């Protein structure tokens, strides 16, 4: 049984609470990264909504369209990249280098578990179209 990406995010953010304390100056430094991460996530959701397909990582089998434009032209996993960016911003806001370890754990777990499962479904559903997309666009970022 896999933990959904949102659950992994909550676990990682919770683990970060053990490291460092929030401060206004560090929050100010982290805010642009958090805002950019939020914008990336919202842009990805908008792309899926415009295509009329699911963005639910638990029900990838409901994918009805392969979205390859917008932010998805630069990363195949913009929502996971956005969550990872939010976790990095949280570590920065807490002033904690050890707080980056849960980010690495999140990226590893999502990459090896969720993304691999999603890719298998997308390859089956969209075949050569997905294969060409996967060759053109990296999992995380260009």
Image: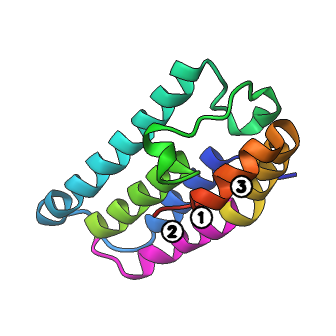
Q: How crowded is mark 3: few (under 14 residues within 10 Å), some or many (20 or more)?
A: some
Q: Return the residue nearer the eye: 85 or 97.
A: 85
Q: Quadrant of residue 112?
A: bottom right
Q: How crowded is mark 2: few (under 14 residues within 10 Å), some or many (20 or more)?
A: many
Residue 11 shows in this picture: no
Identify the mark nearer the N-term, 3 or 1: 1
Q: Name the residue under label 3.
A: 115
Q: Return the residue nearer the eye: 98 or 125.
A: 125
Q: Mark 2 points at which residue?
A: 103
Q: Mark 2 touching mark 1, by CB under 8 A?
A: yes
Q: Residue at x 44, y 51 (%)?
A: 82
Q: Element at badge 3?
A: helix
Q: In which quarter of the image is residue 17?
A: bottom left
Where is residue 11 drawn, in percent x and y? 59, 57
Apparent side of residue 9 relative to residue 53 in the rendered image (left or right): left
Q: Residue extending furthest bottom?
A: 97
Q: Mark 1 points at which residue?
A: 106
The answer to whether residue 114 is above or below residue 51 is: below
Residue 117 magenta-drawn?
Answer: no
Apparent side of residue 27 relative to residue 52 in the rendered image (left or right): left
Q: Return the residue nearer the eye: 39 or 121.
A: 121
Q: Element at badge 1?
A: helix
Q: Residue extending furthest left?
A: 25
Q: Give the range drawn in magenta.
A: 95-110
Q: Element at badge 2?
A: helix
Q: Which residue is drawn at 33% across and 73% down?
A: 20
Real-space CA distance between mark 3 and mark 1, rounded to the nearest whole angstrom: 12 Å
Where is residue 6 drawn, in percent x and y? 60, 45
Where is residue 137 drawn, in percent x and y? 57, 57
Q: Which residue is drawn at 84% across and 36% down?
A: 125
């Amino acid at each position: 049984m896999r933990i959904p990406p949102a659950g992994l995010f909550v676990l990682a953010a919770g683990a970060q609470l053990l490291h460092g304390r929030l401060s206004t100056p560090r929050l100010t430094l982290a805010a642009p990264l958090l805002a950019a991460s939020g914008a990336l996530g919202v842009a990805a959701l908008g792309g899926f909504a415009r295509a009329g397909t699911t963005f639910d990582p638990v029900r990838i089998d409901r994918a009805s369209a392969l979205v390859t434009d917008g932010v998805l032209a630069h990363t195949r996993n913009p929502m996971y990249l956005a969550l990872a960016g939010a976790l990095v911003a949280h570590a920065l806001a807490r002033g904690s280098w050890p707080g980056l370890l849960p980010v690495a754990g999140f990226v590893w777990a999502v990459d090896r578990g969720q993304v691999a499962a999603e890719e298998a479904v997308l390859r089956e559903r969209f075949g050569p179209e997905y294969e060409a997309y996967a060759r053109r666009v990296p999992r995380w970022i260009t």
